[in-house]
Image (cartoon, rainbow, N blue to C red):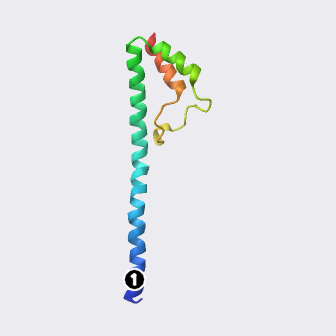
Amino acid sequence: MEPAEEVPSLLLYVATVVLEVPVMVMRVVTPLWGRLWREHEYRADLYAARLGEGLQLADFLATHAPIDDHPIPFVWLSGHSHPPTELRIDRLRRAGV
């Protein structure tokens, strides 16, 4: 193989690596960010419960929950930033007792 033919293949390899690295990083980081934001949502709900508004918030969430909101299997592997409303309501009702 001549040196002139090696340059395009080397550039292609470098470009592939450079473009693939952010994708691989996002596959690792996205579930971590999702977990962080879901935990923040639970903490906000707990704060509302400590203020004495937990049951009212649970009733509000039960009334205004999106139709397609349902628990997600293996949510810890996903980037979903909000926990399912059912789980939030359950935690709020337990904290309000």
| Residue furthest to the bottom | 2
Q: At 59% from the left edge and 29% from the top edge, which residue is drawn?
A: 66
Q: Residue 91: x, y in percent? A: 47, 20
Identify whether 54 is placed above or below 39: above
Identify whether 52 is placed above or below 37: above
Q: At 48% from the left edge and 38% from the top edge, which residue is drawn?
A: 80
Q: Residue 27: x, y in percent? A: 43, 50
Identify whether 29 is placed above or below 51: below
Task: Tell me the crowding category of disc 1: few under 14, some 14 to 19, or many 20 or more residues within 10 angstroms, Cα based.
Answer: few
Q: Amino acid at mark 1?
A: Glu
Q: At 41% from the left edge and 34% from the top edge, which residue is drawn?
A: 37
Q: Can you identify the residue that label 1 sits on? A: 6
In the visual, does 52 lie left or right of 86? left
Give the quarter of the image for residue 46: top left
8 or 76, which is in the foreground? 8
Q: At 49% from the left edge and 37% from the top edge, which residue is drawn?
A: 75
Give the quarter of the image for residue 12: bottom left
